[in-house]
Image (cartoon, rainbow, N blue to C red):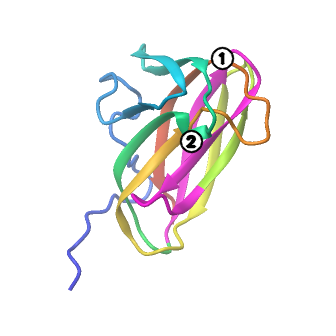
Amino acid sequence: DAPEVPTKPEGENMLLNPDFAEGDKNWENAVTAPGEAKVSFEGKKAVYEISNVGTADWNVQLKQSGITLEKGSKYKVSFKAASTEERAIKVAMLSAAYDWYGGADIALSKEEKLVEFEFVMEKDTDANTIMVVSMGKIDEQDTPLSMITLSDFTLEKVS
């Protein structure tokens, strides 16, 4: 028998430190060369001052791992985001081997916006899913240098 996987009830935020009240606790700041960014976690926001977007979206990322997604369940992701320049970012729910479970490409502007999307976990239950916000070079798009502000994350099971 498979071990019992702890799950959160519907409507409860599954992320730890979702408002950055404890700085970067439970979050991983992943800036990989040639990407460059000055990162701060203050005022309940994650702020990425990007000075080099690099050559791939994963060159500048914010991540949280250890999330349990159940096969057949529907999930809703929401957060607030703004950028000093118009550009795109990517949000993805991935396995440790980078299998894609769900996500969205998000167009940002100078105005803070509420980002929301839903997805269904089609693959087997995974107790070590990673939420990744990628802010490096987006394929086939102009990706200007900018300061990106992220806040108020929620990930909840909706059915």
Q: Mark 1 is on which residue type?
A: Ser
Give the label on residue 146, or none.
1
Q: Position of residue 21 (x, y in %)?
A: 34, 23
* Helix, strand or loop for the magenta stretch, by majority: strand
Disc 2 versus disc 1: nearer the observer: 1
Q: Quadrant of residue 139?
A: top right
Q: Which quadrant is the N terminus positioned in? A: bottom left
For label 2, the crowd category at 10 Å Cα-Cα, with few meaning under 14, some 14 to 19 and many 20 or more, is: some
Give residue 133's position: percent from left, percent from top.
Answer: 54, 39
Viewer-side residue, 123 vs 30: 30
Foreground pick, 10 / 64: 64
Q: Which residues are magenta?
A: 73-102
On screen, 117 above or below 26? below
Answer with the quarter of the image where residue 4 lies: bottom left
Label whose residue precedes the other's in the sequence (2 or 1): 2
Circle 2 residue = 78
In space, the residues marked 2 and 1 are separated at their CA atoms by 22 Å
Residue 8, labelled with which disc?
A: none
Q: Amino acid at mark 2?
A: Ser
| Residue 36 lies in the magenta stretch | no
Q: Tell me where residue 104 appears, x and y as whole percent.
A: 66, 49
Q: Which residue is depicted at the point 40% across and 46% down? A: 13
> Is 122 on the left-hand or right-hand side of 12?
right
